[in-house]
Image (cartoon, rainbow, N blue to C red):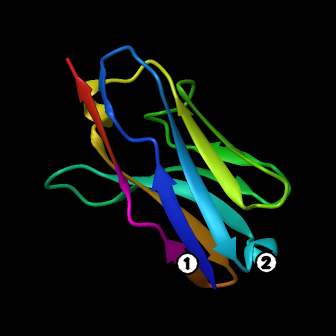
Amino acid sequence: QVQLVESGGALVQAGGSLRLSCAASGSTLSINSMGWYRQAPGKQREWVATIFSGGTTLYADSVKGRFAISRDNSKSAMWLQMNNLKPEDTAVYYCNAQIGVTRSWGQGTQVTVSS
């Protein structure tokens, strides 16, 4: 099992940058993939980005070219660098880790982008 804690959320102006962090503990070496999701008020949670054990990354079209996901080799930390933020990026951002078919989630961190 893995425990996840996100941090780094803040209020930022459009065009600005933020770096979210996710600290993982527990069975981190067993993690197959890690990722970020977000949920805006009144909307369903949506996938943002994923990084696989081999380092391959995938991004939602809405953030491609603006966001970058990275992770340390021990899989105990993951980051999401967010540049050129837009008001539509406003959401609670959640860290996710997958081991086999089991997914673990953090508690979320709020990102608010003002226009």
**Which residue is at 48% across, 33% downward?**
63
Q: Which residues are magenta?
A: 104-109
Image: 76 above or below 50: below
Mark 1 touches mark 2? (CB < 8 Å): no
Q: Residue at x 57, y 40 (%)?
A: 80
| Amino acid on which the number 2 mark rests in the picture | Ser
Asked whether 73 or 48 is in front, the reply is 73
Residue 71 versus residue 107 in the image, above or below:
above
Q: Residue at x 61, y 69 (%)?
A: 97
Q: Is 46 part of what is drawn in magenta?
A: no
Please rate how many residues cluster around mark 2, counting C-alpha atoms within 10 Å: few if below 14, some from 14 to 19, many from 20: some
Sequence-earlier tag: 1 or 2: 2
Please give the residue where the numbered disc 1 appears in the rendered image: 103
Element under disc 1: strand
What quarter of the picture does the C terminus occupy? top left
The picture places residue 6, in percent across and down from the top left corner, at 48, 55
Left-right relation of 2 to 16: right
Residue 5 at x, y percent in the picture: 50, 62
Q: Callout 2: helix, strand or loop?
A: helix
Residue 39 in percent (x, y) is at: 30, 54
- Residue 70: name its quadrant: top right
Left or right of residue 80: residue 90: left
Say if 52 sits above or below 21 in the image.
below
Amino acid type of the residue that numbered disc 1 sits on in the rendered structure: Arg
Q: Which mark is residue 74?
A: none
Identify the residue under disc 2: 30
Q: Alpha carbon of mark 1 to alpha carbon of mark 2: how far?
A: 12 Å
